[in-house]
Image (cartoon, rainbow, N blue to C red):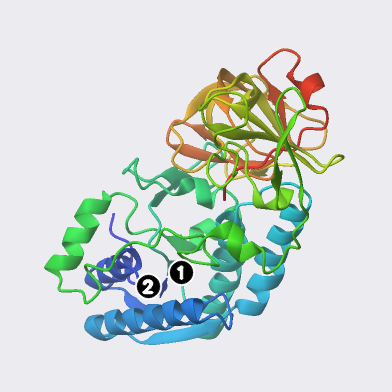
Amino acid sequence: MTEPSARIVVGLSGGVDSAVAALRLVRAGHEVVGLFMKNWEDDDSLTRCSAEADVAAAAAVAEHLGITLHRANFAAAYRREVFDRALAELRAGRTPNPDILCNRHIKFDRFLHHARERLGADAVATGHYARLGTAEDGGPTLLRGVDPGKDQSYFLAGVPRAALPQVRFPLGDTPKAAVREEARSAGLPNAERPDSTGICFIGERDFARFMQRYIERSPGPILREDGAEIGRHAGLAFYTLGQRRGLGIGGGSGRGAAPWYVAAKDPARNALIVVQGHDHPWLQASAVTTEPCHWLAPLPPEGAQLAAQVRYRQPPQPGWLSHGADGGVTFHFAEPQRAPTPGQQLVLYDGPCCLGGGVIADTRPAAAGEAEALGQRQPTEAL
């Protein structure tokens, strides 16, 4: 059934996805308004130039479509609700996901309220690759996008469920290649603009180098499994579980030429623990436990057979669920998983339905005796 005409505010980022989302809504007969969100302020010339290019691209799209483009500055809220929280997590030896925080607190909270209260929107829309559906309780729920290579439901798992009826995802039923071709056919001015692949608040830059502007260096030892020191690190916050590059411990470490990987952090000794081998047992976990979960569908029963992801674009991993006393869950994987990370998000699925999830608080080592060998284990994974 065709949706009645509505006033829909589209978050125009300057990218091709949000442009095609707006195009489809215009063609569907809706009253479409564009809104460019400024979420980061920095005196860095690279950031400033990138933001100016994004604004120009969004303005060109709006002009092409014949819609009005408004601007809103959410940078103060972003700094407080996303960036400061990310810094606190990193300093605590954990690894947050800023994109999940941004979707929850900015795009589907601040943006939504601004669009409704200031611009009179009936709904908002974005270029996310996800779909909406109806849960067993009759309420709204989130579904995977049909393109498995672009599905972004993982990043949307923390969005308030109450916001979903006011949200539109025009691209969720379309593969990315078709979206790009649609932009070309419509003559959109940004049809050939490359996709952004950087972290939301720093763009296409080296994460560790950028964060050194905000987190003090705290050098310490890099230790092998047997406790031997084989190098020095710049600070635990700048390294990630499973990381291979940038360790500076190539040849001469006494264990051959096989690459080294970060296996854990030991805050008590300010030590970085490394092992050789991409699939070393110390990098495997059989289960993860979360903080209190956020649900986008009715609470699954104890023992429910579900699928889960601990990172974006990971194939769904089967397993079963058990509930904790504090509102968190433990997900037991059918097969051990490499490098699940405290601070990152466990997202649960029942088929295409995204049930929600929670921040990973702890992991259960798959290898017997690993916990004793590592002591206090606080690994992290790349953002």
Q: Residues within 10 Å of mark 1 (few under 14, many from 20)?
A: some
For label 1, the SS is: strand
User: Which amino acid type is marked by label 2?
Assistant: Ala
In the figure, 236 relative to 87: above or below?
A: above
- Which one is in front, 152 or 5? 152
- Residue farthest front in this picture: 252
Q: Residues within 10 Å of mark 2 (few under 14, many from 20)?
A: some
- Which one is in front, 212 or 129? 212
- The residue pinned by badge 1 equals 123
Residue drawn at (62%, 58%), measured in percent from left and top? Answer: 101
In the figure, 175 relative to 299: above or below?
A: below
Real-space CA distance between mark 2 and mark 1, rounded to the nearest whole angstrom: 8 Å
Q: Quadrant of the N terminus?
A: bottom left
Residue 209 quadrant: bottom right
Residue drawn at (82%, 42%), measured in percent from left and top? Answer: 267
From the viewer's perspective, tell me whether residue 21 is left or right of residue 188.
Answer: right
For label 2, the SS is: loop
Q: Position of residue 21 (x, y in %)?
A: 32, 65
- Residue farthest top in this picture: 368
What number is the disc on residue 6? 2
Residue 305 quadrant: top right
Residue drawn at (74%, 19%), measured in percent from left and top? Answer: 370
- Residue farthest right in this picture: 268
What number is the disc on residue 88? none
- Can residue 34 be seen here? The reply is no
Q: Do the CB atoms of the residues marked 2 and 1 lie less than 8 Å apart?
A: yes
